[in-house]
Image (cartoon, grey):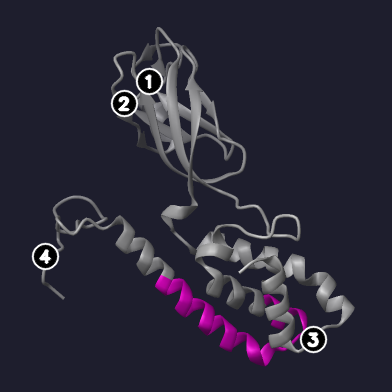
Amino acid sequence: MDFVTLVSSIIATSENDGSEFVGALPDMIQRAQDRMMNDLDDQGLVTYFSVIVSNNTAKVSVPSGGEIIKTFSVEHADGSRTQLKHRPYEYLLDYWPVSASTGTPIYYGFKTNTEIRVAPTPSAVDLNGEIGLIAQISAITTDNPTNYFTIHCENALFYASMIEASLFMKSFNTVPQWSQEYSTEIDRLRNRARRSRQDDMQTNFSPAGGPNTLVKGSD
């Protein structure tokens, strides 16, 4: 699927080729993409950015376009790498109240949606860091006809677009139908994402932390 194919499918399914409707389709498709960005947890949406964690500086800027930060690691002079643990900003203040003091970073947290704080504040030399995040996917247009959604999630994108098209046409009786189709497809994609993260050689662990309560073979 590409932009032209998606637009044609929406027009054909809606049986509406009016100029007002066609002119609004790019906005509908963008809203459909935004809906999917919020609903999906897919490894294919993760992008990695290299950053510098400057010595004697506790702040790092969130890479442009970053929606959700998933991982943050730093590389040390000996080549080893530490995966920083995510903690609330208030925890960082309690743990490392004097930012002028320095050490080896262990934690990171968000002060704002554009600024990350690390603790302890790095010492001695700048550290190379890597941030794994979910970034906003560029909208598909005639000039940018494909993206991750059109290639790997085309059914969900179509159904989400039809929800927006139904709302635009005030065809409220068809919204539940398209919403159900969309929800079913999103569940399939979530299951695919879960399977891509599963190691079949290990027993699943409880995401709540603490003692493992999930037993292989149990209901």
User: Tag 2 or tag 3, which sits nearer the N-term?
Assistant: 3
User: Tag 4 or tag 1, which sits nearer the N-term?
Assistant: 1
Task: State the image quarter where residue 42 is shown.
Answer: bottom left
Position of residue 54 in the picture relative to residue 209 (left or right):
right
Please give the label number shown on residue 16. Answer: 3
Provide residue 133's location: percent of width, then percent of height. Answer: 48, 43
User: Tag 3 or tag 1, which sits nearer the N-term?
Assistant: 3
User: Nearer the viewer's eye, disc 2 or disc 1?
Assistant: 2
In the picture, the quarter occupied by the C terminus is bottom left
Please give the label number shown on residue 120. Answer: 1
Is residue 167 in the magenta section?
Answer: yes
| Distance of label 4 from label 2 (alpha carbons) | 32 Å
Check if mark 4's residue and mark 2's residue have beta carbons within 8 Å: no
User: Nearer the viewer's eye, disc 1 or disc 3?
Assistant: 3
In the picture, the quarter occupied by the N terminus is bottom right
User: Nearer the viewer's eye, disc 3 or disc 2?
Assistant: 3
Q: Amino acid at mark 4?
A: Val
Q: Residue visible at 64% across and 68% down?
A: 32
Seen from this angle, which residue lies furthest right? 19
Please give the label number shown on residue 215. Answer: 4
Q: Which residues are magenta?
A: 164-188
Provide residue 98's location: percent of width, then percent of height. Answer: 43, 16
Between 7 and 57, the residue placed more toward the observer is: 7
Between 14 and 145, the residue placed more toward the observer is: 145
Please give the label number shown on residue 12. Answer: none
User: Tag 1 or tag 2, which sits nearer the N-term?
Assistant: 2
Give the structural element (helix, strand or loop) at label 3.
loop
| Distance of label 2 from label 1 (alpha carbons) | 16 Å
Q: Could you tell me how many numbered marks the image carries?
A: 4
10 Å neighbourhood of mark 3: few (<14), some, or many (≥20)? some
Please give the label number shown on residue 81. Answer: 2
